[in-house]
């Protein structure tokens, strides 16, 4: 095994893992110390719990059900631009939430494009606020994720099985029942469980489209108790409830999600012949078109409104943009300092529980971690003085699980290929990383850094607890503009934020692949 022949010093990796654990557990202990469990939850708190679970259930079910026909159509159709469309399905993952919300408001809001068409047709308008808006936004973000996961499973069905089905003259219904339905039974529950967990801890969507007694999530209730009432005890208690709810759901999702392994194929793609009928072709085309419009129209709306709103952007937006870039850079550097040594430690060990250490950042809500660290910092100094460093650190920990998933497989392959040679040359420690590991890890490291930077520059979470008027990131400044009904200026800020997120991702990803080993 690579871990027996490569002299990687694991002290730094163990230290990074301990640091992550201490940061999360310290926040948890601080929250527990302020939570007055004897007081119990208020009626409004239980309403927030019910709404959180209900909107997560609806979002996961709708996203998954809609993703099935989209993934099936993409799996059995070949057309010009298909690769680009599949690539665009990953865009919402790095899209700042507040930017996407503004795009959705432009299309589905009270004076949006859809309601204008309904008004011309004499039909009643639709409302995007409350439960409808929260679910709509979650479907916008998670439909592409569900489609990609289900499509990956669909494409794992060996081509030889479809050829055998054709030789047996099986019709479309028989092929669905014998090949596709078993796959869906295996993949769909795990996809729905994953989206359910994601929707449980969504803050920015509920902040902008929810609110009110009937549309308040646990995260939003924590924020309201913290910012409006400064009731740290109630915020801490709600954080514990949220931790139990999200943590339990995450464990259940981890148990439900199976490994996709159908076996027996040679990984060849083919043009499917079981759906060549005109009606089936038209149906697949309609599904793909509607999904593309649903995902791309809000982005087009952001671009169109943003260009018109740029002249109305106040100077505070540009200052906030600079602070957002600063936070993103610190997050990327922090992630590299944590992820590289941890990946080295994990890669030299057998697969198992060690990799779960990296999941600590997602085991708790960012708002829970932020609340805990506010409680710890508040008696010592003004928490707003540490708003940007704490935000950057929490963002790095949130991105750590994704980075480890990206880095560890490539690092294991590198050690397996060059481990014995490195030992024979006496390479260990930093020289081993410099000459052997990092040159072959640049592409993966750049991609992980790009994801972290894009997610960090668009994050509206911990900064909402710590920020003051002088230390405001661009997402929070944009939210304040929307709250002041300065929608044109907010649209201009959204365009700047979108450009920053995509630009940071492109620079990091492209920089990692520049002269990197393919």
Image: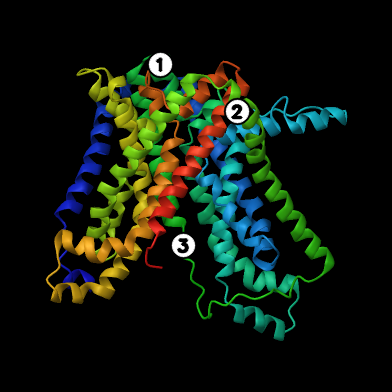
Residue that carries the numbered disc 3 in the rendered image = 258
List x then y, in percent, for residue 438: 28, 60
Compute the Cα span from label 2 to label 1. 20 Å
Q: Nearer the viewer, mark 3 or mark 1?
A: 1
Please tell me whether residue 295 is drawn above or below residue 74 in the rendered image: above
Residue that carries the numbered disc 2 in the rendered image = 491
Q: Earlier in the sequence, mark 2 or mark 1?
A: 1
Compute the Cα span from label 3 to label 2. 41 Å
* Residue 235, numbered label: none
Q: What residue appears at the point 63 percent right and 31 percent down from the top-left corner?
A: 307
Q: Earlier in the sequence, mark 3 or mark 1?
A: 3
List x then y, in percent, for residue 318: 47, 25
The C terminus sits in image quarter: bottom left
Dots 3 and 2: beta carbons under 8 Å?
no
Between 418 and 384, the one nearer to me in the picture: 418
* Residue 469, numbered label: 1
For residue 48, side relative to residue 281 (left or right)? left
Between 485 and 284, the one nearer to me in the picture: 485
List x then y, in percent, for residue 41: 41, 23
Q: What residue appears at the point 20 percent right and 69 percent down from the top-left corner?
A: 3
Dots 3 and 1: beta carbons under 8 Å?
no
Compute the Cα span from label 3 to label 1. 47 Å
> SS for tag 2?
helix
Q: What residue appears at the point 69 percent right and 50 percent down from the top-left corner?
A: 291
């Amino acid at each position: 095994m690579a871990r027996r022949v490569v002299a990687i010093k694991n002290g730094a990796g163990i230290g990074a893992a301990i640091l992550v654990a201490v940061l999360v557990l310290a926040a948890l202990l601080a929250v527990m110390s302020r939570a007055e469990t004897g007081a119990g939850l208020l009626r409004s708190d239980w309403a927030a719990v019910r709404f959180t679970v209900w909107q997560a259930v609806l979002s996961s079910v709708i996203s998954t059900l809609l993703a099935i026909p989209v993934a099936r159509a993409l799996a059995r159709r070949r057309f010009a631009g298909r690769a680009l469309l599949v690539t665009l399905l990953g865009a919402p993952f790095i899209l700042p939430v507040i930017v996407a919300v503004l795009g959705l408001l432009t299309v589905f809001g009270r004076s949006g494009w859809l309601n204008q068409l309904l008004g011309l047709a004499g039909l009643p308008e639709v409302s995007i606020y409350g439960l409808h808006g929260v679910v709509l936004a979650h479907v916008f973000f998670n439909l592409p994720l569900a489609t990609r996961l289900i499509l990956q499973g669909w494409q794992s069905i060996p081509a030889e099985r479809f050829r055998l089905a054709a030789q047996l003259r099986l019709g479309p219904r028989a092929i669905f029942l014998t090949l596709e339905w078993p796959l869906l039974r295996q993949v769909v529950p795990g996809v729905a469980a994953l989206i359910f967990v994601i929707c449980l801890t969504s803050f920015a969507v509920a902040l902008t489209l929810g609110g009110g007694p009937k549309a308040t999530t646990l995260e939003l209730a924590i924020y309201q108790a913290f910012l409006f009432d400064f009731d740290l005890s109630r915020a801490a208690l709600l954080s514990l409830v949220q931790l139990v709810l999200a943590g339990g759901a995450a464990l259940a999702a981890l148990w439900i999600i199976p490994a996709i392994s159908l076996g027996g194929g040679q990984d060849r793609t083919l043009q499917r012949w079981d759906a060549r009928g005109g009606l089936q072709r038209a149906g697949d085309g309609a599904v793909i078109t509607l999904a593309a419009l649903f995902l791309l129209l809000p982005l087009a709306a952001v671009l169109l409104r943003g260009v018109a709103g740029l002249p109305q952007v106040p100077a505070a937006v540009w200052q906030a943009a600079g602070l957002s870039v600063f936070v993103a850079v610190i997050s990327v550097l922090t992630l590299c300092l944590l992820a590289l040594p941890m990946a080295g430690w994990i890669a030299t060990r057998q697969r198992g529980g060690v990799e779960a250490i990296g999941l600590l950042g997602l085991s708790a809500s960012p708002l829970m971690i932020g609340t805990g660290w506010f409680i710890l910092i508040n008696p010592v100094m003004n928490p707003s003085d540490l708003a940007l460093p704490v935000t950057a650190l929490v963002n790095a920990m949130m991105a750590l699980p994704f980075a480890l998933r990206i880095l560890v497989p490539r690092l294991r392959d590198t050690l397996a290929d060059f481990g014995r040679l490195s030992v024979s040359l006496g390479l260990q420690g930093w020289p081993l990383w410099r000459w052997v590991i990092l040159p072959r890890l640049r592409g993966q490291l750049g991609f992980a850094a790009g994801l972290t930077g894009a997610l960090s520059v668009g994050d509206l979470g911990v900064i909402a607890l710590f920020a003051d008027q002088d230390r405001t990131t661009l997402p929070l400044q944009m939210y304040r503009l929307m709250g002041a009904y300065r929608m044109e200026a907010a649209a201009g800020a959204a365009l700047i934020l979108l450009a920053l997120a995509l630009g940071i991702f492109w620079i990091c990803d492209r920089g990692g692949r520049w002269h990197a080993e393919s």
